Amino acid sequence: MSDLEQAKLLLNNTRNYLKQSKTEIYNILKDQKVTIWKDLDLAPHSDVLETVGISAKSIKKALLEYPSAAKKISKQITIWNNEIGNQQADLIGKADHKTILAAAQKIEQTSQSLETLKDDLLRHIIILQEADKKLRQCLSVKEIVGLALILSEKHRKLFTIGLELFNLISNDLSKDASNTKTIEDVINQAKTLETRFEHIEIIGLPRLTEEVLFRYVDLGSSTTKLVKTFVEKFNSRLSNEFGAIKSIDQALIAMQNESVPTLLSGITAQSKKLSSLICGFYHKRQLKGNLTAIDQTLELLNVYQLTLKNKIIKSIPLQIEDPQSKINHVAIASKMTKTFFLGAKGIVRSVKMMVTSLKGEEAINEIELQLILESTITKCSAYSGSSSSKKQNMDIFIDSLIHHFPKPFPYNDLLQLAKSTISTYGKELEHYINSYSIDSDIKSLATVPIPSTLSQLIAKIKKKQDEFKKANEQ
């Protein structure tokens, strides 16, 4: 390519670069995110601006300085375009092509300094564009709580106390720095805990053992249901407030595409509504105590569930297999069998059974009685039930084991012995469970004090159960 052709190409490329830059600057200056600030009175909106991290002072400075930066660019582009025009005219009839190429190269290099001028302009423009961006990022209840506080200066005490309850019920809209659980968190925790109690597996154990354990599981499950019912009622009592919070949030979201003046006015209006709403929570501040009580009860139930499932239920099979254990069914059956034949009453029974045997009626010996009592422990599905149906089921089961013995003797004595064996085994199992020490690793999961033994924890849970029963009846 000749020097002349290179000069022509450089001058055309430089002119196109200047044209594109001029268009780019023009579009920036016509951007509504920039022009909208020019005629806006910032004074009435200073609170909004400062709250969302926008410096009114920086805005004013940018508005003052960017026009002169733009004029400087425009003036320089005009100078360079004139110079390019002169050089293009010189191309005609001049034989010194090297000098022409050198001049073209020089203006091409000099015009690159336009980038520095553009950067200076953008430094001011970005302040205005970022301010627009920040305003649109704060269009949620969570982001305007700070402004609501400023607008409630005359009612600071009401707002501060009301904000504590607001943070608890407003779900993910306004979580405070301490990550306090919201009402939604508590509801979800109660539902999860209820499911965990329902999925505790009690299989492969003697039937009477399972029956006793079911009662412990039912205590946790029924208490959790009461708590869940209460917290759902608690939630419904604040339905108007939830609706108001949602309404404010939706109004803010709907402003996403509005102009800056509309945004500023709208944010201020919704912040005033939020300020009034939060101050109103002051008069319902006692509900915070209710939510705290719910949370503490769920922590107790969580420790109870983990201890039952992961510790006690896993340890019981080992205890049952241990001949020295007080809940070994063979040992208890043997003990109860011996009481049947010992003492004055035992002597009388032995004599009566001898007579019964002589009459040709079926009597019972120690081995057979022990096997019956072992079956009673391992297969009976009723334990100290107060309902008539459970008592009837117990009688029916025991009868299936001893129905072939004569009545009233020894049938009635065997019936009472079997019931006594059920009661004895159940009490021993309850004692083992109740005296179980709660492990420190499980205790560490709770933020509330946890007692040392399960019986103490059960006492706390039963107290809570009574409280929530009464509360749900109101």
Image (tube, rainbow, N blue to C red):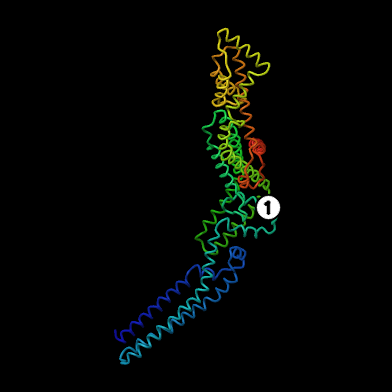
- Residue density around tag 1, few if under 14, some if 14–19, many if 20 or more, within 10 Å: some
The quarter of the picture where the C terminus appears is: top right
Residue 104, above or below 298: below
The residue lying toward the viewer, choosing from 334 and 439, is: 334
Q: Secondary structure at mark 1?
A: helix
The answer to whether residue 474 shows anywhere in this view is no
Question: Callout 1, which amino acid?
Answer: Ile
Residue at the limit of the structure toward the bottom, as seen here: 95
The answer to whether residue 215 shows anywhere in this view is yes
The residue lying toward the viewer, choosing from 246 and 319, is: 319
Residue 413 lies, in percent from the top left, at 62, 16
Residue 29 lies, in percent from the top left, at 48, 73
The quarter of the picture where the N terminus appears is: bottom left
Residue 466, above or below 154: above
Res. 410 image quadrant: top right
Residue 116, above or below 169: below
- The residue indicated by pointer 1 is 161
